[in-house]
Every structure is written in C-alpha cells, then in structure tokens.
Image (spheres, coloured by chain):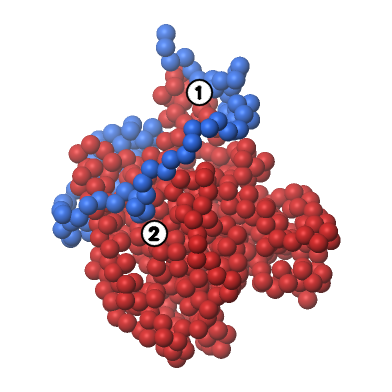
Chain colours: A blue, B red
C-alpha cells in the first residue's frame, strides 16, 4: 500500500494530537511521516488474515480483588504538582458559559 | 583499593566484612559523579539524601541487620518515580515534577537497603536510541566522549560504565537497556514482560515497557533482578516469580543455542567478527549451535513503530498542562491551553511519535496499520517461541554497529535501525540480556542472549560463560 502524506493530513493529525507546527516544522513532519509509511510497507509482505491480533503478550485474564478502601495519596499531595489549583480542585479556563 | 572499581558483588562483600562503609562507598560514587559531570549522566544527583541513606545503612549493619543491597549505591533512570525527588523523563514538560510516591522497584531497592545516588539522563520519555533527545542535553559516552552512550537508558548505562556506581536501573521498550549496555560495554538485562512491576514507571508503550538492570557482571544482574522482580498488587500485569535460584550456572555443556539465519545478514564487519567469536567461544565450552529461522524478523521494526507509537500517543495524552507538569501561557480557552502546553513542552522526537501513533490509530488507517501490526505481533511471538522450543536460548548481536558519534545521525527514521535486534524481543515479551564481548576499533560490542519466558537465570548463565571467555580474549 503506497501512501504519502500531504500538508492537509499533517494538519488533521496535529489537531488530533493537540500539537501545532509552523511551516518548516509541518514540512519536516510531512517528510518524516512519509518515510515511516515507507517502513510500514513491510507489513504488506505477510498474510496474517487468519492470525488473531495480540494486544498484550500475557494470556492475562481479569485480575480481581476485594473492593476494599485503602489509603491513597491525598488530594493536597496530588495538587502540589498542578500548575494551578484552588479550593482542592484544578483550575482551567471556563468551559461552560 | 578504589571502592568504585568494585562490582556489586565485590562491594557487597566489602561492606559485609567491614572493609568499607556505606558512607565511604556513597561518597566515592558522588565524588566520581561530580568529577565526570561533563558526561551529563544525571538529571538530578541527590547527594544529601544518598548520604543520609548510607549513614542509616551503616547503622543497620552495626546493629547486625542486613539486606541484599544494604549500603550499595545505585542510580535510577529518570522515568522511574521517586518520592520527593523530581522525576523528569528528561522532558521540559516534567522539569519540576516531584512524584508523591515511590515506584514499586524503588520501594524494593530501599527495602533492600540500596542507596539511590541520583536520577539518570535519558532520551525524552524514553523515545530515542542515542540519549540526544534529552531536554537536559546529550550524554557523552564514558568510552569515547565524542560518541553517544546509546539510549534511551543512556545515563544509567554510562554511569555504570564510567565506574560511578556498580549498578543502575533502566527501562526497555524496544532495546533501551540492551542497546546502551552494548554501546557502553556493560551487562544490560531486560527481564520477561511482567516479571518486574511497572507501577511508578512513567508509561511510554505499556504492552512493551519493562524495567531492568545495568551491572558489570551477569551475577550482579541476577542479584539486582532478584530484588526487583515479583508480583505487585499495584500492577495487575505483574507475575509471581517462582523459579529463583541462588547461583547462576555458567556451564553451557549440553546447552543448545539457536541462531536465526535472519540475524546474520547485513551485519557490520567489526560487530560480525565479535559475534562469531562469541559463538565460537560458546562452542568451545561445549554448547551446541543450532540453525533456526524467524521469517517475520524483517517486519519487526515496522510492527514495533506502529504499536509503540500508537500506545505512546494514547499514554501521552495525559500531558495537558492541567493535572501536573508545565502549563504554557497566553491561552484563550481550554483547547488552546492543551495545544500550547503540548507544543511548547514536548520535544521533536516525542511529537513525531505522537503524530505517527495518531495516524495508525485514526479512522481509515486502523485496520491497515494498527490491527495488521497486532496480528503480525502474534506471528513474531509464535516464531520466537517455536525457535526456542528446540533451544535453550537464541543468540544474536545486540546492535548492528558500535556507538555512533554524537550528532552523526540526522535522519530519525534511520536511527531506528539501531534497534533491529532488540525490538522483536519486546514484541514477544521474552527476556534478553546484552553481555559485552570485546571491542571493535576500541568500542564495545555486545552480544544478546534471548531466553524462554521467565528464564532470566538461564540467559544470564550463558552470559556468564561469555564473560569467562571474554576474560581471555575479550579485548581482541
């Protein structure tokens, strides 16, 4: 599957990724993504239509435990790393009018 | 006796016999780190905390108490959380982040009496193979200051190679322990996926990430592995480790070691010579060499970059300038707050991985890339496990070349090739170790031994056999 990436695609991905690229950076990123897609051509060389996908290497099933409350990190301790907090909550710009 | 010349095992014996105190050993490590400051091995050196811990270790020993690492100085990669000590992932985003808790491995180190001297430099968020993507500047190899130590756990590999500390922890998602171990000439162990708790390891690609060790010998690697491994209720993917032995068996007589034809094509001359010498050394010690095949080998790098980037894009969505980490200025609304913070504080390589990750996960491409890679992942795992069915271990070079010069590789896509031998192992979850086996043009070359799941003792035993052989002709 030969694919290349155009400027519009870079802009779409940047939006999805919550990133911004100016002209030169966007062009570098376009070149890099195109090169990676060339790498990914290797995936076309194998037929795996009847091989199941692996998301996780362990044949792990759900790990269950008793639903018991245990001590955890305090609100105040966690908020110490927040860029801005007030009254025990994170502060962000207003999102609802 | 220069205490910093001692291996972990030797230092532990010297501490136990009273020849040296933990405070002396720690002070010697800190002095050497200070002298080697230009190597840039550390993001944060915690001298005060380390000396306090060493003092406590000496007190405990005086009272007749002991621990597997009591008084032993150790370095920890800066993506492993340490309570009260900043943990940056070598990113501007986490430049001032101070974790409120210890990673499980850090807790285990402390319980065993280890003295943490500092947090080591790395590629930003562990994404890189050279340590050049650190927001705190590149690391200079202790072997040759013009060269990279490898990555992403370059600082941890280099501090052990420089003789600053006898051991260090790193993390390995696609080779980030083994490849720098190879470049720096130390032993680097990536345990079986799930053998070591990932709780408190800042995530890059969760289905591939694994914490492991840097040491000067295989015995030391096993000693440190024994301290950090095991089931942890805070990491639901962690496993009970049952087959712990006390001593490594370095006798390879009767062992069968597999080499895949795919491993030996396109091999750099100098590395190829050392690899062949390692194979000959194992044969001379009585091992049988068997030819095997891993047909999917050539697809592994593509599979790795699809899966690891997809997981990274998802894991790194948490950096939004709200909950922790840096926040940009001059935003109008919440969307701009996210975008400006991520654009300002992520480095270029991290942005590349996020972009490619979101590409392979996005609607229309998911089946062709992410799902297909996940299917081939199954195939790669089947082939490695099938090859290991008739063998005790597989052997291949750790990296296709010796350490390159700093700044030599300007195309990130080509840098990825240095991980060609290491990434398939993460895809399969198997354990592997890189053991130094001499040099090419004066630069260290590592040999990688890949084992069956949870056979850390087996691969380190074969590594020990190589150490014995290298003792004779290692620097040929």
Closer to the camera, B131 or B61?
A: B61
Q: Residue at x 18, y 60 (%)?
A: A46
Residue A84 position, x and y percent, is: 58, 24
Closer to the camera, B133 or B236?
A: B236
Q: Which residue is mark 2?
A: B429
* Chain letter for the residue marked with disc 1 in the picture: B
Residue B404 position, x and y percent, is: 47, 67
Closer to the camera, B185 or B197?
A: B197
Q: Residue furthest front?
A: A66
Q: Residue at x 39, y 74 (%)?
A: B393
- Same chain for mark 2 and mark 1? The answer is yes
Tell us which disc is closer to us: 2 or 1.
Answer: 2
Closer to the camera, B130 or B375?
A: B375
* Chain letter for the residue marked with disc 2 in the picture: B
> Which image quadrant is residue B168 in?
bottom right
Residue B425 position, x and y percent, is: 38, 63
Mark 2 vs 1, N-terminal side: 1
Q: Check residue B330 in the rendering and tell me which mark sits there, or answer none.
A: 1
Q: Residue furthest bottom?
A: B284
- Mark 2 is surrounded, within 10 Å at the Cα level, by few (under 14), some (14 to 19) or many (20 or more) other residues, namely many
């Amino acid at each position: 599957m030969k694919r290349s990436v155009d400027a519009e695609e870079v802009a779409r991905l940047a939006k999805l990724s919550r990133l911004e690229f100016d002209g030169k950076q966007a062009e570098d990123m376009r070149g890099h993504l195109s090169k990676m897609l060339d790498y990914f051509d290797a995936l076309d060389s194998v037929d795996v239509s009847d091989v199941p996908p692996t998301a996780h290497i362990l044949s792990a099933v759900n790990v269950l435990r008793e639903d018991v409350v245990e001590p955890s990190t305090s609100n105040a301790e966690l908020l110490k790393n927040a860029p801005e907090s007030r009254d025990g909550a994170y502060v962000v710009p207003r999102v609802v009018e | 006796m220069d205490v910093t010349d001692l291996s972990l095992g030797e230092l532990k014996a010297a501490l136990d016999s009273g020849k040296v105190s933990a405070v002396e050993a720690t002070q010697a490590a800190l002095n050497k780190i200070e002298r080697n400051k230009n190597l840039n091995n550390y993001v944060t050196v915690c001298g005060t905390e380390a000396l306090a811990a060493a003092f406590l270790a000496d007190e405990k020993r005086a009272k007749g108490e002991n621990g597997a690492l009591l008084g032993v100085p150790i370095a920890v990669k800066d993506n492993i959380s340490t309570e009260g000590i900043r943990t940056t992932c070598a990113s501007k985003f986490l430049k001032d982040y101070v974790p409120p808790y210890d990673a499980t491995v850090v807790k285990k180190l402390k319980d065993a009496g280890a003295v943490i001297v500092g947090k080591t430099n790395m590629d930003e968020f562990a994404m890189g193979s050279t340590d050049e993507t650190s927001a705190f500047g590149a690391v200079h190899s202790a072997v040759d200051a013009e060269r990279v130590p490898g990555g992403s756990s370059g600082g941890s590999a280099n501090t052990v190679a420089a003789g600053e500390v006898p051991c260090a922890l790193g993390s390995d998602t696609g080779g980030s322990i083994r490849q720098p171990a190879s470049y720096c000439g130390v032993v680097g162990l990536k345990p079986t996926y799930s053998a070591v708790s990932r709780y408190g390891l800042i995530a890059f690609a969760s289905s591939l990430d694994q914490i492991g060790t840097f040491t000067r010998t295989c015995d030391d690697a096993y000693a440190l592995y024994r301290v950090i491994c095991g089931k942890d209720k805070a990491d639901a993917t962690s496993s009970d480790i049952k087959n712990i032995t006390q001593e490594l068996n370095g006798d390879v007589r009767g062992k069968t070691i597999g080499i895949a034809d795919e491993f030996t094509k396109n091999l750099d001359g100098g590395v190829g010579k050392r690899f062949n010498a390692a194979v000959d050394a194992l044969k001379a010690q009585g091992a049988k060499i068997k030819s095997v095949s891993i047909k999917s080998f050539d697809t592994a790098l593509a599979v790795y970059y699809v899966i690891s980037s997809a997981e990274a894009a998802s894991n790194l969505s948490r950096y939004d300038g709200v909950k922790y980490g840096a926040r940009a200025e001059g935003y109008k609304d919440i969307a701009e707050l996210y975008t400006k913070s991520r654009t300002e504080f992520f480095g270029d390589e991290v942005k590349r991985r996020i972009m490619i990750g979101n590409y392979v996960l996005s609607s229309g491409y998911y089946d062709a890339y992410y799902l297909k890679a996940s299917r081939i992942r199954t195939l790669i795992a089947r082939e490695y496990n099938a090859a290991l069915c008739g063998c005790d271990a597989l052997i291949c070079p750790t990296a296709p070349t010796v350490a390159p010069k700093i700044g030599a590789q300007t195309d990130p896509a080509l840098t990825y090739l240095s991980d060609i031998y290491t990434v398939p192992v993460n895809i399969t979850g198997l354990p592997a170790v890189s053991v130094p086996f001499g040099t090419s043009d004066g630069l260290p070359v590592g040999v990688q031994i890949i084992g069956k799941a949870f056979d850390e003792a087996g691969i380190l035993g074969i590594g020990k056999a190589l150490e014995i052989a290298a003792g004779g002709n290692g620097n040929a």
